[in-house]
Amino acid sequence: MRTALEVADIFRVAGPAYRAAHAGHLSLHQLKIMSAVEHCRTAAMGGHVEACTDCGHWRIAYNSCRNRHCPKCQGAAARTWLAAREADLLPVGYFHVVFTMPAEVADIAFHNRALVYDLLFRTASETMMTIAADPKHLGARIGITAVLHTWGSAMTYHPHVHMIVPGGGVSCDGTRWISSRPAFLLPVRVLGALFRRLFLTRLMALHDAGKLAFFGPMAPLADRRAFLRHLSPVRKKRWVVYAKPPFAGPAAVLAYLSRYTHRVAISNRRLLAFDETGVTFQYKDYRRSGAGRQQVMTLTSDEFIRRFLLHVLPRGFHRIRHYGLLASGARKDNLEQARQLLAVAPPTADDTSVEPADPRPPCPCCGGHMIIVEIIERRYQSRAPPPSSNASGRPAS
């Protein structure tokens, strides 16, 4: 069922004015995403008409845009991804670990997203693998599923990586499974110190290689001395690595993953109102506790769209990555070895996980079988830039 308010509604009404006001400053990639969100599951995308074979009831189903930034298209993608990951779960506790970066480094990431996001992934995963392999801590090779988020709850720019990590790993000689302590995986201060050193060393190497770009007020950082001065305070800061206690079983792990892996900057269910004053939505203020954490914010439509577009990922960038035992190339063999060491049987093939022959919901009137009786042609390509629009946000005729 359609929610009362959607991001698409805001884009349709306020998008034309926003694009006109920021012409020349929006990338083609951003324009295509706005177009996809605006036209997702509308007649412009095409679709089909279904009719019940028993009572004759009919309904129209429009196609989705399948864009990974669209709030309406993540449910099916998440379900498909989770079904594939369920077989990877081991009968051990799982920890939630978060790596974030200081604001000074996030400013650099804003101008160099693909490079710095990739660096964040690589250094965070290497930090976990290195400390876990140290006999003073765990002495094992672990597995990691990592997910990049670039937003805070109020859609501010806040790049960080969430990790799901099994509570243990395979010993370095491959002969046994080494379990972590029940509520402790690795020391977060040690993780933070190594993460800071690896990240800053490699960030400096990117600058020395001339791979970083800076614009506007950040342009002076192209000079090496200015760049070093900018980084000087963060070399002394404690880089916070956050680790939550283990989840209560595989079902809880899947529930967590379903919330985080395919999330976008803001979901439609958080939107409360959209009028001449702007967009009102719910967010969490993590500086507060209890009932006071849930807050309400109103932004102008221009600022709302600007914040949404802050979190457009670079084209082709993989925001979910796997490392160690879960690295794609050797995942199957590594998991088989881990199960043998844990003395657990491999997962059995579950026929219920196979997609049904007819995924269409039954008739809402009589529960009968729905069949396609007509195809609605797509009016234009979903990945094209938005057509010219009038003040109402509808395509001009």
Image (cartoon, helix red, strand yellow):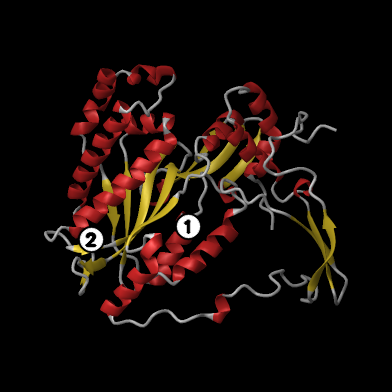
Q: Residue furthest left?
A: 136
Q: Residues within 10 Å of mark 1 (few under 14, many from 20)?
A: few
Nearer to the camera, 381 or 248: 381
Residue at image x 54%, y 37%? 308
Q: Is residue 287 visible?
A: no
Residue 51: x and y, percent? Answer: 84, 68
Nearer to the camera, 79 or 319: 319
Nearer to the camera, 100 or 24: 24
Note whether 225 is above or below 325 in the view shown: above
Q: Circle 1 sits in a helix, a strand or a loop, which is it?
A: helix
Residue 159: x and y, percent? Answer: 39, 40
- Say what amino acid the circle numbered 1 marks: Arg
Q: Circle 2 sits in a helix, a strand or a loop, which is it?
A: loop
Find the distance from the CA under tag 1 to the CA under tag 2: 23 Å
Mark 2 — residue? 185
Report whether 126 appears left or right of 54. left
Residue 320: x and y, percent? Answer: 44, 53
Assign the C terminus to one quadrant of the image: top right
Nearer to the camera, 94 or 210: 210
Report whether 49 appears left or right of 210. right
As drawn, the label of residue 81 is none
Mark 1 — residue? 259
